[in-house]
Image: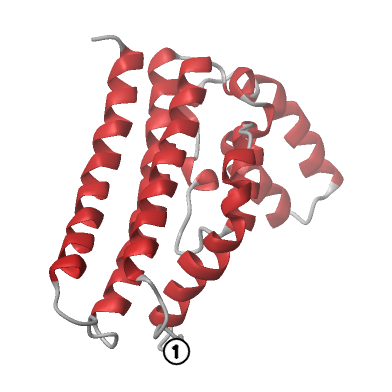
């Protein structure tokens, strides 16, 4: 199997594993008599749905960067803004030395060899997410990746106002109003997002 197919299949396998767990939740609700216990089951579902959303995004990032490493492409040839992932240490040195003229000159001197590097020294954390994968964070990360955000644009409000906001409310001990929440719809929305995210990353792997 080619490297390309391996990474494409890996993204599919990761998505299907998460989608199955979400489907199991839907089956549980569908077979349950009456409404679920909103003090427990709804909160657990909301936190789990967000965890799958953020977790799968990070897995897609790892697959994408892993593919670039194996194919030995230069970072600048994939997307110029991805050079941020090679320059995080350099930026920190500039900051530590208060952007003095000497430090800025040294930064420029080190820049030329850095922009010729591949992904082996790439800091993947600059395009990962830690507990706040809202639409603004997606915009920032997709800009660095050189990805088109339009497939997710119609889902912006639900990402921010439901998937992210409800999870933050539960995680921080608030009591979001869940009495009218359709948990099955929420789970299905999360599954739709995972499929869209998989398509985005797979398309960009194929295009490279």
The residue positioned farthest toward the top in the image shown? 2
The residue positioned farthest toward the front in the image shown? 33
* Relative image position of residue 64 (x, y in whole percent): 43, 30
* Relative image position of residue 97 (x, y in whole percent): 73, 54
> SS of the residue at dot 1?
loop
* Relative image position of residue 184 (x, y in whole percent): 32, 64
| Residue 66 visible at all | yes
Which residue is more in the foreground, 115 or 163? Answer: 163
Q: Kindly identify the residue that appears in the image at 86 percent across and 44 percent down.
A: 101
As drawn, 205 above or below 143 = above
How is this picture coloured?
A: secondary structure
Q: Kindly identify the residue that appears in the image at 27 percent across and 74 percent down.
A: 44
Q: How many marks are shown on the rendered structure?
A: 1
Q: Residues within 10 Å of mark 1 (few under 14, many from 20)?
A: few
| Residue 208 visible at all | no
Left-right relation of 122 to 106:
left
Q: Quadrant of residue 134?
A: bottom right
Q: Kindly identify the residue that appears in the image at 67 percent across and 33 percent down.
A: 81
Q: Quadrant of residue 179?
A: bottom left
- Residue where numbered disc 1 is placed: 174
Left-right relation of 165 to 181:
right
Q: Kindly identify the residue that appears in the image at 17 percent across and 61 percent down.
A: 27
Which residue is more in the foreground, 11 or 42? Answer: 42
Which residue is more in the foreground, 115 or 35? Answer: 35
As drawn, 73 above or below 130 = above
Q: Looking at the figure, which quarter contains the N terminus?
A: top left
């Amino acid at each position: 199997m080619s490297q390309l197919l391996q990474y494409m299949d890996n993204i599919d396998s990761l998505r299907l594993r998460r989608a199955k767990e979400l489907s199991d939740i839907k089956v549980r609700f569908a077979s349950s008599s009456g409404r679920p216990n909103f003090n427990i089951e709804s909160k657990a579902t909301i936190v789990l749905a967000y965890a799958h959303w953020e977790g799968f995004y990070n897995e897609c990032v790892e697959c994408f960067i892993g593919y670039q490493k194996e194919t030995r492409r230069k970072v600048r040839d994939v997307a110029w803004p991805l050079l941020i992932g090679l320059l995080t240490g350099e930026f920190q040195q500039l900051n530590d030395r208060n952007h003095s003229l000497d430090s800025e000159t040294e930064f420029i001197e080190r820049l030329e060899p850095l922009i010729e590097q591949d992904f082996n020294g790439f800091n993947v954390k600059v395009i990962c997410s830690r507990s706040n994968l809202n639409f603004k964070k997606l915009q920032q990360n997709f800009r660095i990746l050189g990805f088109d955000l339009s497939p997710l644009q119609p889902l912006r409000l639900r990402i921010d106002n439901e998937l992210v906001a409800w999870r933050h409310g539960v995680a921080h001990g608030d009591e979001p109003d869940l009495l009218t929440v359709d948990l099955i719809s929420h789970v299905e929305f999360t599954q739709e997002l995972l499929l869209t995210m998989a398509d985005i990353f797979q398309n960009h792997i194929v295009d490279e």
